[in-house]
Amino acid sequence: QRCDDISSYERFDWAIPVIELFHLQMMLATTILRTHYGDIGVPGSLAFYASMLGRNRVTLDGPDFYATNELLQHTFDAMVIRAWGLDLGCDCVQGMLDYILQEKLEQRIDIVLDKLMELSELEQLNGTVSMNAALFIRDMLIYIELSSAIKAGDTGRIHEMLVWVTIFCQVGGTKNYAYELLRLQRGLKCAWTDQ
């Protein structure tokens, strides 16, 4: 025990919340994996992509967090690049770069994200694979933001993401996590002081 140490840093008081947030990130990655895993024979499912990329450590039985995180990140990057290419009407990266140089980048990103995030826009997507990709991108944006906020130690961003993570937990079948996160949010908003 280091309870006699003079500061909270030296007592490692900061370590427990960091571990808890990392555990939350692992749980969210597993929930996204379970939600979007699908079947190995179905194009657009994470099982299909894991098979195509030879990611044998990514399974539903006991997912390896680092392998799962890597698959989620790589799949997200590929889907975003493909969605961007389709929106711009080009099939190659060079065509996308040429187009981007001519236009204002931030406005284009907003247009593409709005198309992917609006539920009403999902009906206009071409087929189930495209709709599943849009839902996966939506879920991954929340995961990436939470991961980034945890890494940066930004409590404001973490607090904003807790609402979405709570919804993920409720919908994803991890009701105990949802209950605990609701309790945490209630404490942060109503019961506890700012200190």
Image (cartoon, rainbow, N blue to C red):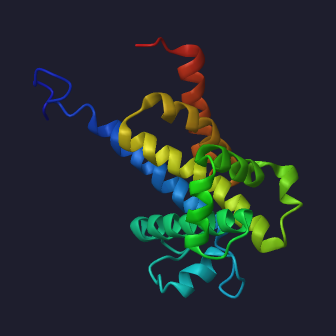
Residue at 74%, 55% (x, y): give it.
116
Which residue lies most toward the front here? 102
Identify which residue, 105 or 101, lies in the foreground.
Answer: 101
Examine the rendering and report whether any part of residue 173 can be seen: no
Q: Position of residue 9 (x, y in %)?
A: 19, 29
138 over 91 or under it: above or below? above
Q: Does residue 25 appear in the picture of this structure?
A: yes
**Above or below for 171 versus 180:** below
Q: Quadrant of residue 123?
A: bottom right
User: Residue drawn at (83%, 58%), measured in percent from left and top?
Assistant: 122
Look at the picture and state if 142 lies above or below 76. above
Residue visible at 58% across and 19% down in the picture: 189
Q: Quadrant of the N terminus?
A: top left
Query: What is the number of callouts on the image?
Result: 0
Q: Nearer the viewer, residue 186 or 140?
A: 140
- Residue 142 coordinates in the image, percent (x, y): 59, 47
Residue 70 location, quadrant: bottom left
Q: Position of residue 173 (x, y in %)?
A: 67, 55
- The residue at the point 88 percent across, 61 percent down is 124
Query: Residue 95, percent across and down?
Result: 61, 70
Task: Tell me the quadrant of the picture where the C terminus can be found.
Answer: top left
Residue 1 placement, left or right of 20: left
Tell whether 154 sits left or right of 48: left
